[in-house]
Amino acid sequence: MHLPSHLLAMIGGLLMPLLLSELWSPWWLLLPLLLLALLPGRFSLPRHWLTLVLVFLLGIAWALYWHTQHLQQRLPLALDNQRVTIEARVDGLPEPTVQGWRFLLTDAYLVDSGEALPKLRANWFRGDPVAHGEWWRFEATLRRPRGMSNPGSFDYEAWLFAQQIGGLASIRGGERLADAQPGLFDGWRSDLRQRLLGVFAANQQNPRVLALITGDRSVLTRDDWQVLQATGTSHLMVISGLHVGTLAASVFAVFTLLCRWGRLPWPWPRLWLAAPVALIVAALYSALAGFAVPTQRAVLMVTLVLLSQLLYRRPGIWTLWLGAFCAVLLINPAAPLRAGFWLSFMAVAILLYSLSGRLNLRSWWARLGLPQWVIFIGLWPWLVLWGMPGSLSAPLVNLFAIPWVGLLVVPLALIGALVELVSGYGQLLWLAAWSLNTLFDVLHWVAGWQGPRLMAFSGWFTWLLALAGVLMLLSPLRRLLWPAGVACLWVLFFPNQPRPAEGEFWLTVLDVGQGSSVVVQTREHALLYDAGARFITGFDLGEAVVHPALLAMGVRRLDVMLLSHADNDHAGGAPAVARLLPVTHVLAGQHEDLPEVLDAKACQAGDDWTWDGVRFEVVYSAPAPAPPNERSCVLRIVAANGSAALLPGDLGIRGEYQMLDRPLQASVLLAPHHGSRSSSSYALIRAVAPDWVVFNTGFHNRYGHPHPLVVERYQEFDVEPVYTARSGAVRFELGRESVAQRHWVWREQARRFWHEP
């Protein structure tokens, strides 16, 4: 049996269901299996091909079964958005937020009926501290796992599914029923975390190094992560495969040398001691990280390598890589839905492809520096695929940061933690924390010179072309192929995005929850109307949703950012957008209440301009004494053929009546004030005469938007409603025909089986 080909067949089968919008029943595979059973007697197919097909189908069957079982463990529809009393056990390491806690709940059930609940991700605003293993009774609002749906943005629903989280819980109040009853590993992690936090507090040291001891990322601030992204060193601050592999190799080498020097009385072959000890240490360190995917890969690779040594086998390195890849997929077929899975495995694959006896490393600096350049080039397509920023300084920074962390910080931290637990001596821990904080000082300095570069995924053809370019640049024939490789990779930096024709425009209403953000594109220009909210937790929709969506739509600069008014759900994300993209002009209602960094100018009724045959008109903007919502800047965009869109912000009925004397007719209307009862008057609907009305609201929002009476009012005029809470982002194309055409609905276009309908 040719093992690599069978591993590839199994991997292909395990990955294939992730392309489906709806899951098949595994029973459908009985038909091809039956055909396989009949084929040998009818056709002279090689047995090798038959076994490959069988392995492929078995991979599909297992993945379909696994996905089906986990989809069935989601929160029942009857409990969606319901306030209930539950009892549950706190699992994992609770994460402190700005004003509360975020944690996982397992073994949960409804107090009233005893109905079992799936694994829940809970948020408790201004809640009491919780600890792993504690039993609590909570008053909570439960929700099914649903996220915003936009081009280019993070797939929250995929992340939850890969974590096997079946629901969300907003905690309203709680009562501790029993103290911690920790399990073996999580309890160990929790106790160690609490003890070491006390040590760092006593020594007035930043506890960042905890991320490398217990895998606790909550000790890293938002500023820390921005610095790590800007310098391409995020991988160093999680317990990754690099750290696990380095530790295992170090332990193996130490025990081998101790046996060779006679320091350990071991009468059997040295390998029989060094290999199991190295594997145990690697497994324990991975347990500290909660067995995250990169550490799973590392432990599996270490296991396979050491087993091959113990059994005196010499399998090919690619066979070991494929074996680890396949094993992780068998354990969790949803693991590929997380970026860490691909970045971890692809980094190893790139090094194997480019350095395994192919590149001639003649000097010590080449041996040290070349792997950094290989990873830098090789991972660019994968970073683009996952919407992650890349850093131009990454190769040089990693040249000193990797050995600094791997050979200095991690050993000091682990030995220091062990010494502190045994003897209470914390100086080694202090030294580890000091060395890591010193590295962060250097990274802050480097990050000040240049920020991360975020590039958008612009289609599979472009991406595959870039991947081919990487393979050319890293191949043994790179001296011949480098011009073609550079040309293929260049498409990542300057993708050829489709654009509207002259006199036409595209209007894309983004899904930013209970807020507003609309992108208007003409042939050569782009305008952003509102930028979503920024929350007290630090989560910024301008950075997380609006900016990635703009890049995915080919927008590299904004000619105008127009903010309807200063409310947070409309303007909170604007500073982040202005920081991440060049913005030529900022106009706003309530411009005086916006941050100075925006340098916003007043939006005034009567302002107008023309881009590429498309006319932009500010039809209304009330002066300062008016209430905030009534100061909304109302924008009308008119294509060359007269079809138009109207964006009224949070304007209420009072402002609607005041602008009735202006031309308002539009094919697409953004519902005023998210469809609240205090807006969308009969007079406005008659004056606009829209074909479509878009309600930009949050799913199950607390305001009840859109109000049923408002929806009914639009229905009386035969206006087609679109709800971003259900559809995700939606794009209209205006100017090609007399009526606006809905081009796509993102939740439908990007749908996969794990997405909520």
Image (cartoon, rainbow, N blue to C red):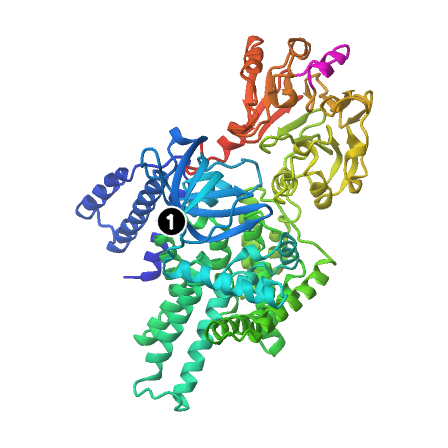
Looking at the rendered image, the quarter that the C terminus falls into is top left
Left or right: residue 687 compared with residue 288: right
Q: Residue furthest left?
A: 41
Q: Nearer the viewer, residue 654 or 19?
A: 654
Check the image and report above or below for 576 versus 705: below
Q: Is residue 663 magenta?
A: yes
Is residue 683 depicted above or below 210 in this figure? above
Q: Determine the residue positioned at 63% across, 35% down.
A: 498
Image quadrant of residue 607? top right
Magenta-span inclusion, residue 29: no
Magenta region, main secondary structure = loop
Residue 127 left/right relative to 399 = left
Q: Which residues are magenta?
A: 652-666
Q: Secondary structure at mark 1?
A: loop
**Residue at figure coordinates x 63%, y 70% from the top left:** 434
Which residue occupies the foreground of this view, 466 or 450? Answer: 450
Q: Amino acid at mark 1?
A: Pro
Mark 1 is surrounded, within 10 Å at the Cα level, by few (under 14), some (14 to 19) or many (20 or more) other residues, namely: many
- Residue 515 visible in the displayed image: yes
Which quarter of the rendered picture does the N terminus lie within?
Answer: bottom left
Q: Quadrant of residue 586?
A: top right
For label 1, the residue is: 333
Q: How far across and how far down the image is residue 29, in percent?
A: 27, 41
Whole-percent x, y for residue 372 in the image: 59, 66
Left or right for 486, reference 578: left
Residue 481 in sight here: no
Q: Nearer the viewer, residue 336 or 675?
A: 675
